[in-house]
Image (tube, rainbow, N blue to C red):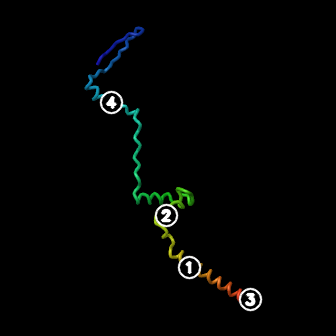
Amino acid sequence: MAEYSTYNSGSALSLSKKLYNKDAYLNVIDNTFTELVQPQPEEETSPNIGEFFTQYNQLFYEIPKEGEVNSHEYLIKQSTDYIGSQGISDEIQALLDEITSLREENLELQQNIIDLTNS
């Protein structure tokens, strides 16, 4: 350690300074530039299936019903495209069959009216 003494306007000013040799300096003083380095972004990990559905259930009522993206409508379209056209359930098919039957019956009744009117 080196000491220096200085006199200023009649009062003594004492300064001290520690000196290190090169080997001691590298062991004692951190000479990396951590302040200038950009922080590394945290690596995002995708949730597993269980975590996804937990988050989905928590956000369920916050998700808009309709919309091009980020909506329940979007999820339904994506899922339907993925699983294919198997989306028609047995109940819907039964209703479609009933509509077809009622249309045929309606045509027959209209034809009967026309036949009775012409006779």
Residue hosting label 3 = 118
Residue hosting label 2 = 81
Q: Is disc 4 surrounded by few (<14), some (14 to 19) or many (20+) residues within 10 Å?
A: few
Distance between mark 2 and mark 3 Cα atoms: 53 Å
Image point (47%, 59%), residue name: 56
Choose mark 1 or mark 3, whichever is in front. Answer: 3
Residue hosting label 4 = 30
Q: Is disc 3 surrounded by few (<14), some (14 to 19) or many (20+) residues within 10 Å?
A: few
Q: Is disc 1 surrounded by few (<14), some (14 to 19) or many (20+) residues within 10 Å?
A: few
Image point (28%, 19%), residue name: 1
Res. 19 image quadrant:
top left
Distance between mark 4 and mark 3 Cα atoms: 109 Å
In the rendered image, the vertical position of residue 116 relative to residue 73, given as above or below: below
Q: State the SS at label 1.
A: helix
Q: Earlier in the sequence, mark 2 or mark 3?
A: 2
Residue 35 position, x and y percent, is: 40, 33
Q: Earlier in the sequence, mark 4 or mark 3?
A: 4
Q: State the SS at label 3.
A: helix
Image point (28%, 28%), residue name: 26
Distance between mark 1 and mark 3 Cα atoms: 32 Å
Q: State the SS at label 4.
A: loop
Considering every residue shown, the one lying at the far front of the view is 118
Residue hosting label 1 = 97
